[in-house]
Amino acid sequence: MARSSDKAAGLSPAERTRLWRKERQRLGLVKLELWVPPGAKADVQAAARAIITASSRGPALSRNPDPPQEPKQMDHVIDTDWSVKSLAEALAATRLLREGELTARVMEGAEPVLQVTMHEFGDLPVFVSAGSEQIVVSALLWPVDEQKDQAAFNVFLLKAQKLVPLSNFGITTVAGRDYYEVFGELSCKTTLQTVVIELRTLAENAIQAADELRDTFASAA
């Protein structure tokens, strides 16, 4: 798959999902579906992530062949507040990432924002802002005005919060139009490793929301 944000520009959530699935199939991955008791879901998800992280999944998704040799590369910022600029520089230099996993660029403005293009998730754009107390990582889903039965879906989405680990749902306004978004929040003094984990988790949750939540709601309606 071409690593180009131009290719994915303007894609709908469903189209991004198809692109994401196509890349997984190209890498020889298969989808497994498990039915487990509600209380066991978080444990199963954590175990699955641990297995995936520990195993080799092909050239693009394999473990980092050159991991950090010194703990300070992950933890040296624990006592220093992150800024959008320092995050961009750290992501460009770190060995915590897989080759070609993401691209980060600073979008200048009254309050600079870091746009992170997640290449392994259909070039999904994830936005990172850093304030005085917290880092917010978010991804837009789809316009609110395109959602059928909005009031009922909003209630459904609030209940679905428990099913999506480490992320929350909200509504944000972009260029005068409301969009559903998925977001996570971190301390400004968190480690770079935690930021990387949040980026991956949020991208996965955005794909899951686009792929499963709307279908689940439509089936229940």
Image (cartoon, helix red, strand yellow):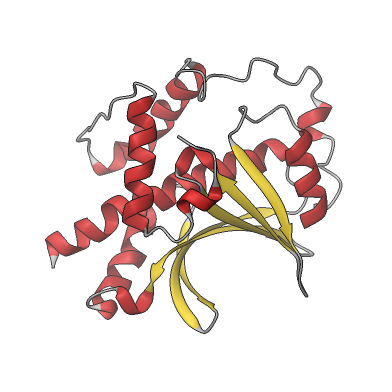
At a point 34% along the width and 79% down the height, the residue shown is 145
The x, y position of residue 4, in whole percent, is 54, 44
- Note whether residue 194 is visible: yes
The x, y position of residue 203, in whole percent, is 49, 47
Q: Relative to 121, is 110 above or below?
A: below
The x, y position of residue 174, in whole percent, is 54, 76
The reply, left or right, for residue 103 in relation to residue 78 is: left
The x, y position of residue 30, in whole percent, is 29, 25
At a point 26% along the width and 60% down the height, the residue shown is 214
Q: Relative to 2, is 148 above or below?
A: below
- Note whether residue 164 is visible: no
The N terminus sits in image quarter: top left
At a point 53% along the width and 52% down the height, the residue shown is 6
Q: Using the image as rendered, state which of residue 23 and residue 81 is in the foreground.
A: 23
Q: How many numbered callouts?
A: 0
Image quadrant of residue 114?
Answer: bottom right
The C terminus sits in image quarter: bottom left
At a point 55% along the width and 80% down the height, the residue shown is 175
The reply, left or right, for residue 47 in relation to residue 118 is: left
